[in-house]
Image (cartoon, rainbow, N blue to C red):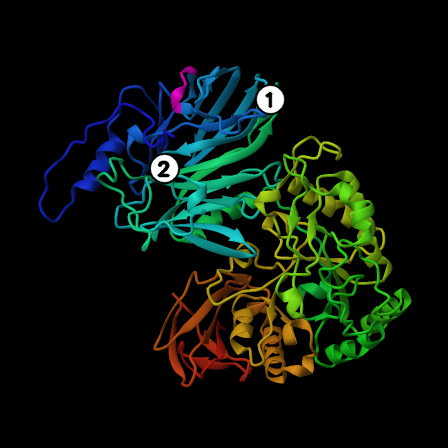
Amino acid sequence: MELRTHRRSCYIKPILIHLSSKHTVIPILALLFSRIAFAGEVVLQDAKLLVAFDSGTGALIKMENKTTNWVIERRPELGASFRLIASTPEFSYNFVYGDSQKIAEVQKLSDHEIRIEWKNLKSDNGETLPITFTATVTLHDGALMFDAALDNGSSLTVETIEYPYFGDLNPPNPSTSMVVHTTRYDHLVPSEIYPRFVGAKDDGSVSFPTKAFDSARSLFCLIQSPREGLYVEMHDPTQPYLLQYTFEQHPGVVSSMTNEVRQEGKLSQIFPHLEFRTCHFIFAHSHSLVKLVTVVVRCYSGDWHAGVDLYKQWRQTWFKQPRVPDWAKGVNSWMQLQIDSPEQDYRVKYTELVRYGEECAENGVSAIQLVGWNKGGQDGGNPSLDTDPGLGSWQQLHDAIEKIQAMGVKIILFGKFPWADMTTDWYKQSLYHYAVTDPYGIPYEGGGDSYFTPVQLAGINNHRFAIMDLADPEYRSIATQEFRKTLALGASGFLYDEVCVQPTNHAYCFNEHHGHGSPAYIYAGAIPLAEEFHAAADSVDKDFLFAGEGPQDWLTQYYPFSYFRISASSIPVERYIDTQAPLMVAVDGFDDREMINFCLMDRYIIEYEPYNFKGRLSDFPLTLEYGKKVDALRRKYKEYLWDGKFLDTEGASITANGPCRYSVFVTKSGKRAVILFSTQTGKEITAKVELPDAGPLVWASPDHPDAKPTNGTLRLPERSAAVIMEK
């Protein structure tokens, strides 16, 4: 097998300029590559960005951030254009490389737009295919937009096309690190790519270390160095198909122990380089025309906040603000309670629920997320939302909900629709018709979840899951009928568990008998399903609350109340994207001050989960009492801590003689607040807050809620929090 690491036979001989020992050769080389115009270039540039394409191959051979002199694409000989796979029934490995093609036409339509067309593409197997690929690249105010279309006149299916394609992605300088940031589960998740390439796909599956990130989880990808970054966006929030942000390190890491990579010189006779491309999973059938989603690339200065600010600007153009009931907008807290599992332990009968509601009402807890109430228990019987005779009758659950909600405590019923329990008669007799199948006609399958017993915890008798086809209108109709059962029970809301689950290996359904083209991207059905749910709820209760387990940002238009878990390293990107979004975090420690302080710092709603949501509020009095103090503080200073705009750590700084975390809020009138807390145990710390041009300051804390003057320096007892506010 030939390893395609060099795409072009030409090589630009480097020009070495000898400087004093205070300088290095590499930055000058980068400068020369960025400024010298090579023969056959087609250049687009404005005041912010310069990008050049080879007029003979269409390869992207140069890209520079002109405001910072970051040469992003540095070596023209490593430039690339596109890559696609045109599979046959007998042969999947049929790559078509852009550098093997002759361009039919290159047009510079204006100073800010070019059009490139490749015709009659030649595959690596030597076959000429009647396929035309056309790309239009536009540059406007530093935003580079890649639009493309594929006209497949062949008898083959074009499964994927990778475009745009950066063949030589470089850091701002060789000593600068680069980290990829994408969103997942309401967090911003980092993954290092330089100077170490960490977290690649399994070594046996690829020739070069590779990692990929799915658009279903993250509409944008940040390629972040300490002081600047590159923002890449899938410019379509409806998710018509899967797009992956793919990174590939050539020829590989220097050391498998350290994952170190090299940028200069040669490694095994190959010039080390990092490729980056966006892979479009289009599955274009023979004799079809497919328009690719637009990919936007922009540079920014600063850390991840500046990159996410670009996403927020675009988000404002399409995001539809969802309706959220008033009770969920204010300071509120929840409890999660599981009453049954697939092992049928029947822990809490329907008639026993009222005493849990009474305890919540006594402690000011606003809602109960009720789990395992449906037939089969939690993660059993899916997607059924029938009541379970082992817990009681339908009427008993209905009456318990009514009594609890009369106390002022909302009941939010829990369920899920991506899976079907394969052990049920329903699945065996009819539901299997709607299972997602792979290209070989075999249903995809999930391992199921484990509860309580040694046999199930070992994965021996788990209820295996079939993956259900959300793109099939008939299955969506079934799911909607199940959802209606929560409305009939009189619940105040529904939490869609695992709405965030978007695994790539079953992202497409190839079942030709389903009500869609084959294959279909199943998550393209997520929004239509949500719209059907909303239509059903609106006919009963327009204040019905839609919640989900960590829905992706594009889905929060339909499931605005998000529930998830965090750790000390979590980056609160969804809170930064939407200050007022109702975001809720699990709190399950028995003296969980740190987690509650995180909730205070990042404006998260507290969900109490004693014994991993199988106990009662009274089971952890230390956690409950501290949580009540924090919520009281948020109500007392609501203007700052609840209604204020969340800036994360932007706009202030702190110095402390111990571990200390903080966040910044600004009120509508422009007054600022800084929440800080100590993670130190065993002793107090001293922390000083720096707020530029601050007015008079006061401080308060959950333990001392009355505001007192301060100069910005506080002594924080162990594991405690405080807030400093401008008067």
- Foreground residue, 270 or 175? 270
Q: Is residue 372 left or right of residue 75?
A: right
Q: Amino acid at mark 2?
A: Lys
Tell me the crowding category of disc 1: few under 14, some 14 to 19, or many 20 or more residues within 10 angstroms, Cα based. some
- Residue 539 vs 624, above or below: the answer is above
- Residue 456 vs 253, above or below: the answer is below
- Foreground residue, 206 or 102? 206
Tell me the crowding category of disc 2: few under 14, some 14 to 19, or many 20 or more residues within 10 angstroms, Cα based. some
Which quarter of the rendering shows the N terminus? top left
Q: Secondary structure at mark 2?
A: loop
Q: Position of residue 676 (x, y in %)?
A: 46, 73
Q: Nearer the viewer, mark 2 or mark 1?
A: 1
Q: Is residue 608 magenta?
A: no
Q: Is residue 100 magenta?
A: yes
Q: Amino acid at mark 1?
A: Leu
Q: Position of residue 448 (x, y in %)?
A: 66, 57
- Foreground residue, 478 or 431? 431
The picture quadrant where one finds residue 230 is top left
Magenta region = 99-105
Q: Residue furthest right?
A: 395
Which numbered disc covers residue 289? Answer: 1
Which numbered disc covers residue 48? Answer: 2
Q: Position of residue 188 (x, y in %)?
A: 49, 55
Q: Residue at x 33, y 43 (%)?
A: 252
In the rendered structure, which disc, 2 or 1, sits on the residue that comes first in sequence? 2
Q: Is residue 72 left or right of residue 539?
A: left
Q: Secondary structure at mark 1?
A: strand
Q: Residue at x 66, y 48 (%)?
A: 445
Q: Position of residue 368 (x, y in %)?
A: 73, 70
Q: From where the camera sits, is residue 25 visible?
A: yes
3D distance between C-alphas at marks 2 and 1: 34 Å
